[in-house]
Each structure stands twice: as structure tokens, then as C-alpha cells.
Image (tube, helix red, strand yellow):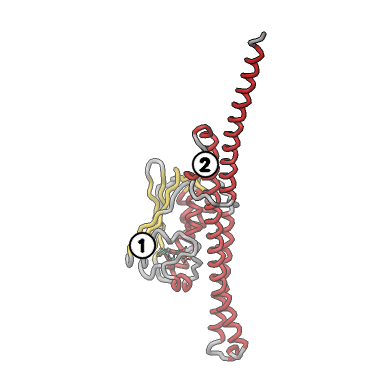
């Protein structure tokens, strides 16, 4: 009994010392955590390696590092989106301004007297009409691209007979080719070849590719053909047009990118066609490819599942 009392007192003292020590350590650790969280909040940390809590808090350190990296990439992604959005808006305003100013110019000139001049009045009206067509092409493409990019494009996949699908598309564009004295041909493929995709969206992509082929070809021909292997069918649009310099090949699918701006506008281009085509083909799990040689022609193609 007499020995028990001092023992209990010693144990109590030791416990107090121990808990005081542990408490002090915890306070230091909590301060470290506070500092790190404060640093993150104030954007003072540049790299996850600056987060250090020591070996006893390794798990927490790893968690905070992971959270820091995720936040950083999320913020960078949002900033990038914001930059793209601002750039896109700038491009759209610029593109809208051109036809609107042109239409305004022609109307004002007509109003200020040209309307009574038979040498120019019809020509000015025709020019103004051309610009309204450009404007409406641009608005349609803008509506398409915003639908696609906001995820509102719904695709409905079915098997379709390739010849039945491609022949009418080519036929519809014959008059456009005729105007430029170009030969436009569809080389029919094996009857009953069926491919899998959304016919409406694929028609939109092919309309764009064939129209481009006609727009950027001065002499020769535009051909549409299909190659087939065991699992896939490849639809090819080939022309003998101006071609695209190698260094621009990867950029022509960007929104508003044109090799020759003036020429594109002259032929009623919006600079959005190939961006729309790329989206449509990628939505089919495929990829749009291009081969081209300046002065010889271009070939755009993509594959679909059989
Ligand atoms: P645009 O409305 O200007 O034709 P697109 O997005 O359809 O815009 O095409 C982007 C650019 O790619 C065009 O401005 C043109 O420079 C080039 N291009 C597209 N298709 C062809 C082609 N078949 N031959 C030559 N250049 C082409």
C-alpha cells in the first residue's frame, strides 16, 4: 500500500509529461497543416513538392498533394476554356462584322444614288445578296458547332446501304460541280455493303467535304469512293484541286482556320466546315484523315464499322 501511492504519483506525472509532449507535437503538426492550407488558399504554392508534413502524417500529406494537383489541373483547364471561349467570341464577332459591313456599304451606296445607275445597281444588289448568304452560312455553322460542343448533338446509329446513301448526296452536288465545269463522280461500291453510323450527320460531313473539294478545285475532277476491308469501310473524297501545304494540314480542322482567308470568303466559306466534320467523325469513334499535295489535289477520308 505504501509503495502504491508513490507509484501512482509517478505514473500520473509521467502521463502528464507524455500528454504534454504529444499535445505540443500535435499543435506543431496542426500549425503545419494550417500553414499549408493557408498557402494553397492564398495561391502561394507552385508545386506539390512544397507540401511537407513529415513521416508521421505521410497519408495526410499524400491526400493534400493529390487534392492540390487536382485543383491545379482543374483551374488550368477552366482558364484554358475561358481563353478558348474569348478567342472564339472574338473570331465570331470578326466574322460577323465582314458581311454586315459589306451589306451596309452596298445599301448605303445604293441609297446615296447608285440605285438610279443601271450600270451598277443590279451588281450591288447581287453583291449584297451574296453577303447575306455568307452570313446565313456562318450562322448555320455556328448553331451546328455550338450544338455539337455543348453535347446537344444526338446521334442515332443504324446500318445503312452505302450506295443508296452516297449516290444521292453526290447527285445533289452535281450542279455545283457543273457550274465550275468539274467532273463529280461517285464510284459505286459492292452492292449491299452496309456501314454503321448516323446517316444525317454523315450526310452533313460529306456535304462539307464534297463542297470543299469543289470549292478548292479549278480544273479536273472530284471523286467519291469507298474502300473496304474485313471490318471497316473507308469513305474517300478526292479532288484535283489547289491542295494544302503540309504545314497547314494539322490546323485546317481548327475552328476558323483557313489556309487562304480571302479565297475562303470568296467561295462563301465560314472556316467552320472541317471543325464540324471532325466532330461528327470523332463522334462515330473514328478519325478524319487528310493527304494533300499543293497543286495536285487533296484526299479526305474516314472509316466506319461494317
Ligand atoms: P472554309 O469554310 O474556309 O472552307 P473549312 O473548315 O471547310 O472552312 O476548311 C478550312 C480550310 O481548309 C479552308 O479554308 C481551305 O483553306 C482548306 N481546305 C479544306 N478543304 C480543302 C480542299 N479540298 N482543298 C484545298 N483546301 C481545302
**Precedes in sequence: disc 1 or disc 2:** 2
Kindly tell me whether residue 137 is visible in this rendering. no
The quarter of the displayed image where residue 127 is located: bottom right
Kindly tell me whether residue 166 is visible in this rendering. yes
Q: Which sits in the foreground, 149 or 61?
A: 61
Residue that appears at 65% across and 18% down: 9
Q: Secondary structure at mark 2?
A: helix
Check the image and report above or below for 5 versus 173: above
Q: Secondary structure at mark 1?
A: helix
Residue that appears at 43% across and 45% down: 193
Indicate left or right for 297 with 104 as reference: left
Q: Residues within 10 Å of mark 1 (few under 14, many from 20)?
A: few
Q: Which sits in the foreground, 202 or 107?
A: 107
Residue that appears at 33% across and 66% down: 294
**Rendered-image quadrant of the C terminus:** top left
User: How many numbered markers are drawn?
Assistant: 2
Q: Residues within 10 Å of mark 2 (few under 14, many from 20)?
A: some
Marks 1, 2: nearer the viewer: 2
The quarter of the displayed image where residue 186 is located: bottom left
Identify residue for label 2: 65
User: Residue 102 location in percent, x, y?
Assistant: 55, 78
Q: Which sits in the foreground, 42 or 31?
A: 31
Amino acid at each position: 500500500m505504501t509503495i502504491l501511492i508513490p507509484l501512482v504519483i509517478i505514473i500520473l506525472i509521467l502521463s502528464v509529461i507524455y500528454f504534454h509532449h504529444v499535445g505540443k507535437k500535435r499543435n506543431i503538426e496542426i500549425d503545419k497543416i494550417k500553414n499549408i492550407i493557408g498557402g494553397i488558399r492564398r495561391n502561394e504554392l507552385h508545386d506539390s513538392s512544397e507540401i511537407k508534413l513529415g513521416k508521421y502524417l505521410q497519408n495526410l500529406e499524400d491526400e493534400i498533394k493529390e487534392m492540390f494537383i487536382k485543383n491545379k489541373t482543374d483551374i488550368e483547364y477552366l482558364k484554358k476554356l475561358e481563353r478558348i471561349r474569348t478567342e472564339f467570341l472574338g473570331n465570331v464577332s470578326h466574322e460577323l462584322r465582314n458581311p454586315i459591313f459589306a451589306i451596309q456599304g452596298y445599301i448605303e451606296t445604293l441609297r446615296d444614288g447608285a440605285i438610279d445607275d443601271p450600270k451598277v445597281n443590279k451588281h450591288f444588289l447581287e453583291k449584297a445578296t451574296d453577303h447575306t448568304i455568307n452570313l446565313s452560312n456562318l450562322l448555320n455553322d455556328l448553331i451546328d458547332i455550338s450544338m455539337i460542343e455543348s453535347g446537344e448533338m444526338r446521334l442515332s446509329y443504324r446500318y445503312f446501304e452505302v450506295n443508296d446513301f452516297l449516290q444521292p448526296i453526290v447527285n445533289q452536288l452535281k450542279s455545283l460541280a457543273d457550274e465550275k465545269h468539274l467532273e463529280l463522280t461517285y464510284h459505286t461500291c459492292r452492292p449491299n455493303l452496309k456501314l454503321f453510323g448516323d446517316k444525317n450527320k454523315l450526310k452533313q460531313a460529306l456535304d462539307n467535304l464534297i463542297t470543299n473539294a469543289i470549292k478548292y478545285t479549278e480544273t479536273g475532277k472530284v471523286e467519291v469512293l469507298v474502300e473496304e476491308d474485313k471490318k471497316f469501310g473507308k469513305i474517300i473524297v478526292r479532288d484535283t484541286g489547289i491542295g494544302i501545304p503540309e504545314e497547314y494540314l494539322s490546323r485546317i480542322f481548327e475552328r476558323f482556320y483557313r489556309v487562304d482567308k480571302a479565297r475562303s470568303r470568296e467561295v462563301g466559306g465560314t472556316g467552320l466546315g472541317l471543325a464540324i466534320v471532325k466532330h461528327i467523325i470523332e463522334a462515330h469513334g473514328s478519325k478524319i484523315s487528310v493527304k494533300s499535295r499543293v497543286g495536285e489535289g487533296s484526299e479526305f477520308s474516314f472509316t466506319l464499322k461494317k
